[in-house]
Amino acid sequence: QVQVVESGGGLVQAGGSLGLSCTASDSTTVSFVMAWFRQAPGKDREFVAATSWNGGSTYYADSVKGRFTISRDNAKNTMYLQMNTLKQEDTAVYYCAASEYLRGSYYLSSSYDYWGQGTQVTVSS
């Protein structure tokens, strides 16, 4: 059973930067599609960014395009999310997701098989 664990959340002022990591339990995930989702209080979980197995293709939600960068290092079984120019509306619990085969579109949470427990990102004014 693959496990993924997020780290790097915290409190940051608006306009600041923060980096998240997602580390997988084993190297089988090197062939997986991996993604970041987030969920703010009272809202549905939403897509943030996704990366193909080798990082050759990346996808972003319009709300984060140009501010966030997704990347991965398969030698370390780790995916990253660099978040710059953070806004208060970026405040949410951020989740790592992974799947060997997507059961739907990359931006749908239902497409992914494995999820982390989430890490809180809070952006203050």
Image (spheres, rainbow, N blue to C red):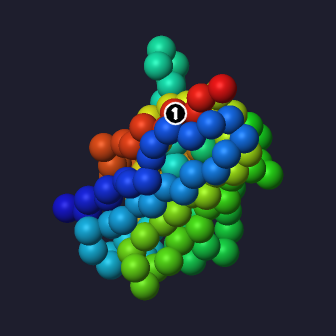
Question: Furthest residue to the bottom?
Answer: 75
Residue located 57% across and 51% down the image: 18
From the viewer's perspective, is 116 left or right of 63? left
Residue located 72% across and 41% down the image: 15
Quadrant of the drawing holding the N terminus = bottom left
Percent coordinates x, y for residue 62 in the rendering = 76, 40
Against 11, residue 66 (above or below) is below
Percent coordinates x, y for residue 51 in the rendering = 59, 63
In this view of the protein, which residue sits in the foreground, 9 or 55? 9
Against 13, residue 3 (above or below) is below
The residue where tag 1 is placed is 122
Percent coordinates x, y for residue 97 in the rendering = 42, 51
In this view of the protein, which residue sits in the foreground, 59 or 39? 39
Percent coordinates x, y for residue 87 in the rendering = 69, 34
Against 47, residue 49 (above or below) is below
Q: Quadrant of residue 25?
A: bottom left
